[in-house]
Image (spheres, rainbow, N blue to C red):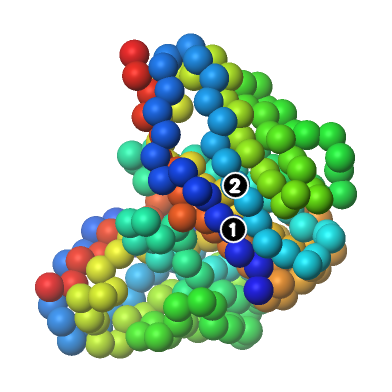
Amino acid sequence: NAGVTQTPKFQVLKTGQSMTLQCAQDMNHEYMSWYRQDPGMGLRLIHYSVGAGITDQGEVPNGYNVSRSTTEDFPLRLLSAAPSQTSVYFCASSYSTYFGVDVGYTFGSGTRLTVV
Amino acid sequence: AQTVTQSQPEMSVQEAETVTLSCTYDTSESDYYLFWYKQPPSRQMILVIRQEAYKQQNATENRFSVNFQKAAKSFSLKISDSQLGDAAMYFCAYRLNYGGSQGNLIFGKGTKLSVKP
């Protein structure tokens, strides 16, 4: 089915370990983003990309790294995991808003990450 | 910077009754979108309803409707004939109708809705 695919769904890391959360979409969306969801905090933007080769920081970028080498993929890297990065992570994509038309975001099913 | 505020962390409604979830936002822009997303225990983010700021008519999707007050910067969600399946976390969100970084979704902190049988 078309949509946003996130892997893994669950992950436990030890403090200091690194890992990559994968995100792939097959809708040819230019815009992709990563959010983290914490209790009582809503969803907060980590990084986003408006097209292949273009990325930028969101509200809470520290400790995370991204790249966008293809339109389809937007991986999120944790370089040295910390307990404060325990959260649920969502990847989302949409068509560009440059033309003033919002056709909505498509969200992945989320990754629950625990750092011990 | 734009902000979205949901002042009700939790709400409860009796099955078949009507409930209204509140949302206010702060922006100096005039061209934007507002959304309500539903997140059931499955964690999936589901778009419930969308409102374009330039449209004065309130959006409606079956049992879900909004009360959009642009001058007051208020965007409440009304759920009529509540069903057990409506129990979820509801998020209000805002997005400028521009390109690039200005098109990011900004979320409120959410309202947890319980439905009593």
| Residue nearer the viewer, A100 or B92 | B92
- Callout 2: residue from which chain? B
Residue drawn at x 77%, y 71% is B99
Where's residue A20, x and y in %? 33, 76
Instruction: Place residue A79 in its image quadrant.
Output: bottom left
Say which residue label 2 marks: B23
Asked if badge 2 and badge 1 are on a common chain, one would say yes
Where's residue A68, x and y in %? 54, 80
Instruction: Place residue B78 in its image quadrant.
Output: top right
Where's residue B43, x and y in %? 37, 46
Q: Is residue B45 visible?
A: no
The kind of residue on which mark 1 rests is: Val
Alpha-carbon span between mark 2 and mark 1:
7 Å
Q: How many marks?
A: 2
Question: 10 Å neighbourhood of mark 1: few (<14), some, or many (≥20)?
Answer: many
Residue drawn at x 46%, y 44% is B8
Please state if B41 lies on the left or on the right of B26 as rendered.
left
Secondary structure beneath label 2: loop
Please state if B84 lies on the left or on the right of A54 as rendered.
left
Among numbered discs 2 and 1, the one appearing first in the sequence: 1
Question: 10 Å neighbourhood of mark 2: few (<14), some, or many (≥20)?
Answer: many
The kind of residue on which mark 2 rests is: Cys
Say which residue label 1 marks: B4
Secondary structure beneath label 1: strand
Residue drawn at x 46%, y 55% is B109
Please state if A19 lies on the left or on the right of B110 as rendered.
left
Residue drawn at x 47%, y 67% is A44
Please state if B92 lies on the left or on the right of A102 as rendered.
left
Where's residue B117, x and y in %? 34, 13
Mark 2 in CB contact with mark 1 (< 8 angstroms): yes
| Figure check: B73 above or below A49 | above
